Amino acid sequence: MNKFQLHLFLFLKIPISWIAGVRLKEMNDEICITKVKFGWLNQNPFNSMFWAVQGMAAEFSTGFLCAEKIRKSGKKISMLVVHNQAEFTKKAVGRVTFSCHQGKELDAVLQKAIETREGQTLTMFSEGKDQKGDLVSKFAFTWSFKVKN
């Protein structure tokens, strides 16, 4: 998928993420980076980005990577977040980028799911950094993968 296709998917299937400003910045076999800019529509009462908006952008940095690798595999594999955890370290203002760098680990887990036809899980991490490069939040999403019959 290219950026346009992905953004169209978000607009049509997850419109709240589009409205909140979540966008794909970069994706390849190794990494996925999403971005979101603090603004009136995604603010909290404390003049920073609402935690759920950060969570969407973080989840997408892991989930887009999963979905694209599953698409490229040609197999029907279900994916589901079964656990998540977050830590917030600084007010999120300005543009925040979320990055996941676990493409190789994901390849191995998906290959094992295909070979064994048993469910597999992988905890994937996404770090949110502001324009200065300061860490504002860290997320962990445990994804479950199962080959469909």
Image: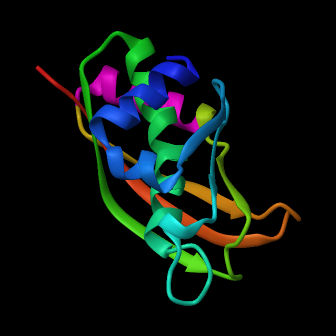
Q: Is residue 145 in view from this perspective? A: no
**Which residue is at the far front?**
40
Residue drawn at 48 percent across, 35 percent down: 64
Magenta span of residues: 105-117
Q: Nearer the viewer, residue 77 or 14?
A: 14
Q: Is residue 67 magenta?
A: no
Residue drawn at 33 percent across, 20 percent down: 115
For the image, the number of numbered tags is 0
Could you say where residue 149 lies in the image, as x and y percent from the top left? 11, 20
Image height of 114 relative to 92, above or below: above
Residue 109 lies in quadrant? top left
Left or right, 19 with reference to 120? right
**Which residue is at the far top?**
74
Could you say where residue 43 lies in the image, as x and y percent from the top left? 53, 74
Residue drawn at 39 percent across, 36 percent down: 10
Left or right, 131 with reference to 14? right
Left or right, 60 with reference to 92? left
Q: Is residue 98 in view from this perspective? A: yes
Q: Is residue 115 magenta?
A: yes
Could you say where residue 76 lies in the image, as x and y percent from the top left? 24, 19
